[in-house]
Image (cartoon, grey):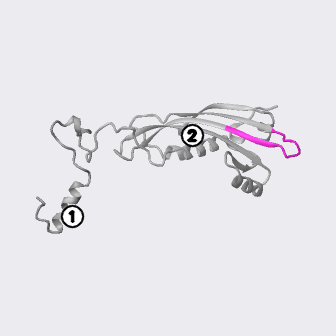
Amino acid sequence: MKPHQPTRLDVSTFARTGSVLEGTLPLSDLPRLLASTSPPADTPPGEATWRAQGLWRQPLGDQPQLRLQLQAHARVWLTCQRCLQPAAHELAVARTLRFVPTEEEAARLDEAEEEEDVLALPRAMNLHELIEDELILALPLVPRHEQCPEPLPWEPEMPTTPAEVPGEEVAHPFAALARLKRSKAGDPTVS
């Protein structure tokens, strides 16, 4: 029996035998994911680690259920949307895919299922492309640092609590707006 090939995976046989594949994949081999990244200069792209396991169940009086459990992890560099500097992000995927014979059945079940995606069973699946798809879906919508490495130009370094500024009161955030509104209305008490 020939070993399972990640680039032409027979999902049916893989699931029925409960097989497992795992490995690492250079991010340079995932061009769509790599195009979304912005590493610092002279930083290699890194790699993704992954694991796939086939599962097969035969419920009483029902069709066999073929599933693929996929886990993947990668560290990528994205542009922080606050400071516009590279920020490292850990992408983690843990997904279970269920395979059914037809597209129609997949569409019907996918609407009803909440925990797993349902797909039509392909003749052969490129597991590397699936891993890339799932990592792309794991990208944050708005990447940013937890705390940017340098102060932002519009955020001056100031004490954050009244206790840090002896003898000063903290102004209400809308106090300046209220003064401006009163000055436009001609209020003589505004200075």
Where is residue 17 shown, x and y percent of the image?
A: 80, 33
Q: Quadrant of the N terminus?
A: top right
- Circle 2 sits in a helix, a strand or a loop, which is it? helix
Label count reads 2
The disc placed on residue 181 is 1
Q: Residue at x 56, y 47 (%)?
A: 137
The residues tagged by marks 2 and 1 sit, at their Cα atoms, a distance apart of 59 Å
Q: What segment is highlighted magenta in the picture?
A: 57-69
Taking the image as shown, residue 87 lies to the left or right of residue 136, namely: left
Q: Is 70 contained in the magenta span? A: no
Q: Residue at 60%, 36% (x, y): give it.
A: 72
Residue closest to the far bottom: 185
Res 140 visible: yes
Q: Earlier in the sequence, mark 2 or mark 1?
A: 2
Q: Of helix, strand and loop, which one carries label 1?
A: helix
Foreground tag (2 vs 1): 1
Q: Residue furthest front?
A: 189
Q: Find residue 44 and report its horizontal and vertical position in percent.
A: 46, 34
83 left or right of 128? left
Observer-nearest of 131 and 164: 164
The answer to which image quadrant residue 24 occupies is top right
The residue carrying mark 2 is 29
Q: Report the side of 63 relative to 175 (left or right).
A: right
Q: Nearer the viewer, residue 162 or 21?
A: 162
Tell me where residue 134 appears, x and y as whole percent. 60, 44
Q: Is residue 130 above or below residue 18?
A: below
Q: Amino acid at mark 1?
A: Lys
Dot 2, crowdedness within 10 Å: few (<14), some or many (≥20)?
some
Name which residue lies at 55% across and 45% down. 136
